[in-house]
Image: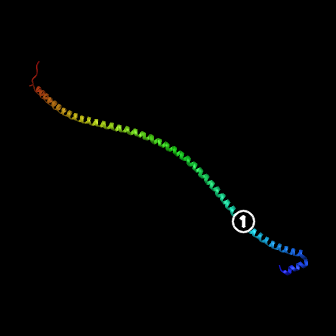
Amino acid sequence: MDSQVVTGVLQTMGVAGAIISVLMGVVAVLSTVIVFQYKHAMKVYGFRLSERDVLNAALTSSTSAIKENAELVEQRNKALVELSVAMRELSGSLEQLRDRVSLQYEFLTREMDRQAQVVSAVAEANRVLSSMTADNRSAIVEFRASLAEIKVGVLDIANRIIRKSSRVNQGGGRTRSK
């Protein structure tokens, strides 16, 4: 403050006037400080509001993401349950298949053993039949030779009979008398 103003206030109002004037100056300074602080507080409040909006948006997005994640986890869990059920069914089917394959293997093994016995029996029968066929061929050859001899013998007898009968028919044949 200017010294003349202070002197003028002291002369006209006294010490109380000086105190009032100082207090008025302090009030003016304090009101300026308060206005500055108010403006600064409003600016900070605005920043905080925008931060709050950003934070609310982030929390909302996070909540949405958590809900979507929870839904995905639930779907995954359902899929895992379905997969475990399918795996149990597949396991049962594979056990049945293993049992069937085992039974078929045993059946085929027994059948192959039987087939081997049949083939062996057929081979033995073929061997016996081949031997019998060879024997039959030999017998047929001998039989043919015997037939040829019989034929020669029969023809010889027939010729003799024909000769004798032709002599008898000619009248000059001998007759046997008893």
75 relative to 40, above or below: above
Q: Quadrant of residue 34?
A: bottom right
What is the residue that sits farthest to the bottom in this orientation? 4
Q: Residue furthest top?
A: 178
Element type at marker 1?
helix
Looking at the rendered structure, the kind of residue marked 1 is Arg
Residue name at image x 57 percent, y 50 percent? 80
- Residue at the left extreme of this rendering: 172
Q: Quadrant of the N terminus?
A: bottom right
Tell me the residue that label 1 is attached to: 48
Crowd tier of the residue under label 1, counting other residues whose Cα lies within 10 Å: few below 14, some 14–19, many 20 or above: few
Q: Nearer the viewer, residue 94 or 164?
A: 94
Quick one: 101 or 165, which is closer to the camera?
101
Horizontal and vertical percent position of residue 53: 70, 63
Q: In the image, 124: left or right of 42?
A: left
The image shows residue 130, relative to residue 168, as above or below, that is below
Determine which quarter of the picture holds residue 9.
bottom right
Q: Which one is in front, 1 or 114?
A: 1
Quadrant where the image shows the C terminus: top left
Q: How many marks?
A: 1
- The picture places residue 120, in percent across and down from the top left corner, at 33, 38
> In the rendered view, does 53 fall on the left or right side of 117?
right
Residue 30 locus on image (x, y percent):
81, 72
Which residue is depicted at the point 72% across and 67% down? 47
Task: Name the residue nearer the viewer: 47 or 126.
Answer: 47
